[in-house]
Image: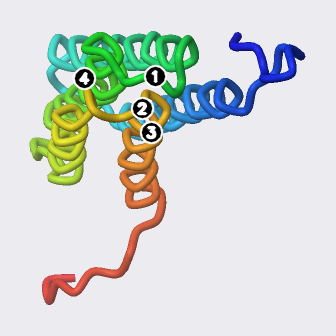
């Protein structure tokens, strides 16, 4: 852990980086649990999709460790790939599982993956902790959207 300015061993940037990492993995886990409630008729596709979700969470956790190592440093290629790519991999698995279970691909997952791709494009010029915060914000918005069902304006309902 990065030492504080007074040498106490505590630093706010490191604490923020750790909190963002934990929160990111918690949101990914919650999205995983929500997606896998349904049974998928195609067991092979469901297993592959679950493996993608778990791998994405593991990569996101590695990204959190990279951010924790140097929170204010400019994000390198590995940090950008792990911080933005891990959640994107998880969401790709999430979308694949939903497709296998329901026959539809959720547009919200595709939009979130697209937003993570944009974040990855600008990531190399950002401090690592800002990159992690932006990736977490995308996941949090997705989670809020999926946890709370907002009223639809569809005339079919």
Instruction: Residue under label 3, please give it.
Output: 130
Q: Is residue 4 left or right of residue 133?
A: right
Determine whether label 3 and label 2 are within 8 Å by CB: yes
Q: What secondary structure is found at the residue carrying circle 4?
A: helix
Q: Work out whether residue 94 can be spotted.
A: no
Q: What crowding class fits label 2: few (fewer than 14 Cα within 10 Å), some (14-19), or many (20 or more)?
A: some
Question: Which quadrant: the N terminus?
Answer: top right
Q: What secondary structure is found at the residue carrying circle 1?
A: loop
Instruction: Tell me which numbered mark, 2 or 1, is placed earlier along the sequence.
Output: 1
Q: Is residue 63 left or right of residue 118?
A: right
The Cα atoms of the two marked residues, 1 and 3, are separated by 10 Å
Q: What secondary structure is found at the residue carrying circle 3?
A: helix
Residue 79 occupies quadrant: top left
- Kindly identify which numbered label has been placed on residue 127: 2
Q: Nearer the viewer, mark 1 or mark 4?
A: 1
Instruction: Tell me which numbered mark, 1 or 3, is placed earlier along the sequence.
Output: 1
Instruction: Tell me which numbered mark, 1 or 4, is placed earlier along the sequence.
Output: 1
The Cα atoms of the two marked residues, 1 and 4, are separated by 24 Å
Query: Residue 11 location, x and y as percent?
Result: 75, 26
The Cα atoms of the two marked residues, 4 and 3, are separated by 20 Å
Instruction: Residue under label 1, please give it.
Output: 73
Instruction: Tell me which numbered mark, 2 or 4, is placed earlier along the sequence.
Output: 4
Instruction: Residue under label 4, please give it.
Output: 89
Query: Residue 61 location, x and y as percent?
Result: 48, 15
Say if 53 sits above or below 145 in the image: above
At 30% from the left edge and 28% from the top edge, which residue is drawn? 84
Q: What crowding class fits label 3: few (fewer than 14 Cα within 10 Å), some (14-19), or many (20 or more)?
A: some
Say if 92 sits above or below 144 in the image: above
Determine whether label 1 and label 3 are within 8 Å by CB: no
Q: Nearer the viewer, mark 4 or mark 3?
A: 3
């Amino acid at each position: 852990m990065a030492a504080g300015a007074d040498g106490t061993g505590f630093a706010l940037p490191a604490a923020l980086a750790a909190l963002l990492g934990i929160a990111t993995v918690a949101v990914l886990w919650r999205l995983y649990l929500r997606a896998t409630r349904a049974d998928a008729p195609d067991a092979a596709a469901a297993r592959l999709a679950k493996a993608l979700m778990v791998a994405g969470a593991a990569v996101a956790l590695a990204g959190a460790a990279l951010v924790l190592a140097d929170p204010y440093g400019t994000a390198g290629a590995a940090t950008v790939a792990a911080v933005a790519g891990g959640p994107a991999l998880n969401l790709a698995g999430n979308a694949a599982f939903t497709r296998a279970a329901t026959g539809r691909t959720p547009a919200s997952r595709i939009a979130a993956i697209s937003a993570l791709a944009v974040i990855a494009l600008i990531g190399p010029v950002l401090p690592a902790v800002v990159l992690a915060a932006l990736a977490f914000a995308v996941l949090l918005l997705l989670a809020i959207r999926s946890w709370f069902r907002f009223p639809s304006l569809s005339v079919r309902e």
